[in-house]
Amino acid sequence: MIAASRSIAALADLQLTRDEILADYRLGWESRQASLIGRREVMAGKAKFGIFGDGKEVPQIALAKTFKPGDFRSGYYRDQTLMFALGISSIHEHFAQLYAHADRLAEPATGGRQMNAHYSTRLLDDEGRWIDLTAQPNTSGDLSPTGSQMPRLVGLAYASCLFRKVPELAEISAGFSVNGNEVAFGTIGNASCAEGMFWESINAIGVLGAPAVISIWDDDYGISVPNERQVTKGDLSSLLSGFARENGSGPGFDLYVVNGWDYPELVRVYREAVENARRDHVPALVHVRELTQPQGHSTSGSHERYKTPERLAWETEYDCLRQMRRWILQSGIAGEEELDRIEGEARALVEGIRAEAWENYQAPIRSEVDEFTDILAEISASAQEKSALEAVANELRARTAPLRSDIMVAAHSALVALRESKAPSRQILADWRRRKLAENDLRYGSELYSPGPVVATEIDEVAPVYSPDSAQLPGFQIMNACFADILARDRRVVAFGEDLGKIGDVNQGFAGLQERFGDLRVADTGIREATILGQAIGLAMRGLRPIAEIQYLDYLLYALQIMSDDLATLRWRTAGGQAAPVIVRTRGHRLEGVWHSGSLMAGIFNLLHGMHVLVPRNMVQAAGFYNTLLASDDPGLVVEVLNGYRVKERLPDNLGEVRVPLGVPEVLREGRHVTLVTYGASCRIAMAAAERLAGFDIDIEVIDVRALLPFDVNGMIARSLEKTSRIVFMDEDVPGGTTAYMLQQVLEVQGGYRHLDTEPRTLPGKPHRPAYGSDGNYWSKPNTEGVFEGIYHLMHEAAPIRYPIFF
């Protein structure tokens, strides 16, 4: 443990000028005023919620001194002073975000989509292309679930290792790295260090030897819960001591402990920690203790309810800005009058910025109010409903801080009042309202998927090409050839996961590829699904194309929170400013037992909007999906069929060029009586049942949807239903799961209900997980006989004499 002294370092040792120190003090007070005034705005009703970085100003200013262009931050919502110091955010943007100003020019971090103190830098230009990340300080898009910033920190830091050690990356690193010299900075609160993601990430970073510098902002509480109830012994430094490098060498972390009010020591500690990390790729943990939180956790509560008077008095005395002032005075750097002036100027500056930010937020909304009320006035001039329309307009004008939703409520009320009017002006109002609804759909809903430069759903299909010499190979060899081709043609691709490297994954899809491409491009990891995903996110944000393997579908649950809250929402919550084109590879269905045979698809894909969820029925289809995803810039999940690795398939002559289009189903068998919709492992069951039913003069059209997100973008299934007038949805998921989703997409979204002659059917698995053994599997999942009988029942209802029940 490197114990940080409380003694005040000599001014000369800091290598800081008087002007720089006073500029730091000024910035600290500007940030503090942004917190104090921000809280006041929330309490006045101008903002919905506020969470601020007061009490953390001085250590964040010290940290900022070591941050260089190209570096990355993965942090949490107390980092406002760090963001101000780096120029990543401004006080004007601070208030714009507080007010939810949904304008990317005013609030570039999220476009008004996230609450305040959630930061991001734009990594993509307006066309969705990467900008030069080495020319600016970078921060990955923040998210609220505590501890969730840690998994992606693994990849942000590890990318520097790859850029430094993998020769193939040297020619493509321009704009992403300068010889792997970048440091990734992680910040986290003390209470979130009790979470598993923190410890899993610390362990992964230590194993990888990645240049991360992690700051723990420790103010002794997690909302109202003190450290004694958060971590063993109530002392994070004690718990972390086992990660320390022995005698300052070998694997592990450099550990530092420093008080958050000690400006000179903070400057010294961060310089040492970051210099070592940058030069030698030695990760560091900086435990910043004795911090305060002057306004409590957030605007949702008061810390006076749970802190003792003695604690509150201590926090007043050891406020970091008060202690910095005392040090400046004791060191003779400035006097009382000068510091008083700096503090007063900071307050006046922030008040002026706040007023300007509020006016900039309200002005366009008031303009829309005027636009709407002008339309109402024109209609009212000749309408019998004049009094009702004037009342709507007056009520809206009376609002001191109108919202766009208030305008839409008023527009709806006006249209209700005009519902019997035949005047042409009524249509003018209806059209105006529709335009505004569409504008706001874009304002709040755009960028869930990439709009360019390569749109995944617009990549053209390239079908497999076969010749008489095309080999018949087991599925795992198809995948092996696919990944060998990908690694050879795209130097950005790295693949990693449990058992992926040395043995080539448990199903041999990567067999021999580590020897061929090296253990940095095809790598084994520990059993750590959350940080396998996080590692992939961080690598992708730094320009690489990771394939992250989660060994089985069931184990995806360990990583699902990170996939859902971070990866799937990243592009949307940064308003198109960031992307992480991660490919997640897993396998499932049709083995044995509860945790190797379950189908969790509905639970998974419903949480992954913002990713593509692909369910190939065989390995050639899977290869085509990998090629499509690598040609695009959206993240995707590919679920390979677990019992398909030993099934022989023909190896396409053009395997590396095969592209399977996203959201385009495939008709596996044409028919005229019933449309049977399924995917993945269930396709073989569907085809077997269709063959049996053919013997009873029941002609089944079997459709493989191939992708759940996106789903049948061209309405192919509804057209099939128009032909057959009957439809069945079948898969291995639970009742009300994926089959219900597919039914809703076809009947409601595609309008397929118009073509039904009989009620639609779903044939899912049982509500329980699959029981062990072949018999357990048979009674837990759809089988050929069950599908046969379910469809036969449909035909019996349509023609009972022709199709009598015999079972």
Image: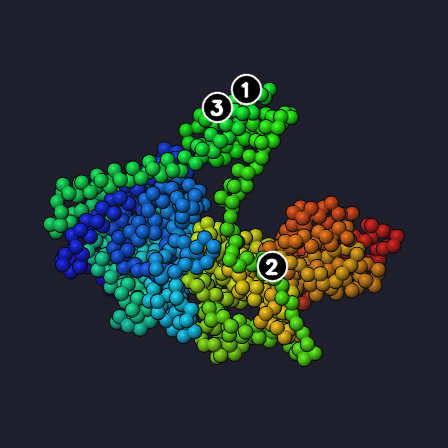
**Which picture quadrant has residue 631?**
bottom right
In the figure, 301 relative to 398: above or below? below
What residue would you read off at disc 3? Answer: 394
**Residue 387: image location, x then y, percent:** 54, 19
788 left or right, relative to 72? right
803 left or right, relative to 658? right
At x 47%, y 71%, the residue is 491
What residue would you read off at disc 2? Answer: 662
Amino acid type of the residue tagged 2 in the rendering: Leu
**Residue 20: image location, x then y, percent:** 20, 52
Task: Give me the C-alpha separation between circle 1 and circle 3.
Answer: 10 Å
Mark found first going from the N terminus, 1 or 3: 1
742 left or right, relative to 604? right
Amino acid type of the residue tagged 1 in the rendering: Ser
Amino acid type of the residue tagged 3 in the rendering: Asn
At x 53%, y 28%, the residue is 375
Q: Is residue 530 visible?
A: no
Q: Nearer the viewer, residue 60 or 786?
A: 60
Task: Give me the C-alpha separation between circle 2 and circle 1.
Answer: 54 Å
Q: Residues within 10 Å of mark 3 (few under 14, many from 20)?
A: few
Label 1 secondary element: helix
Q: Residues within 10 Å of mark 1 (few under 14, many from 20)?
A: few
In the figure, 738 relative to 527: above or below? above
Image quarter of the C terminus: bottom right
What residue would you read off at disc 1? Answer: 387
Mark found first going from the N terminus, 2 or 1: 1
In the figure, 95 relative to 627: above or below? above
**Which picture quadrant has residue 356?**
top left
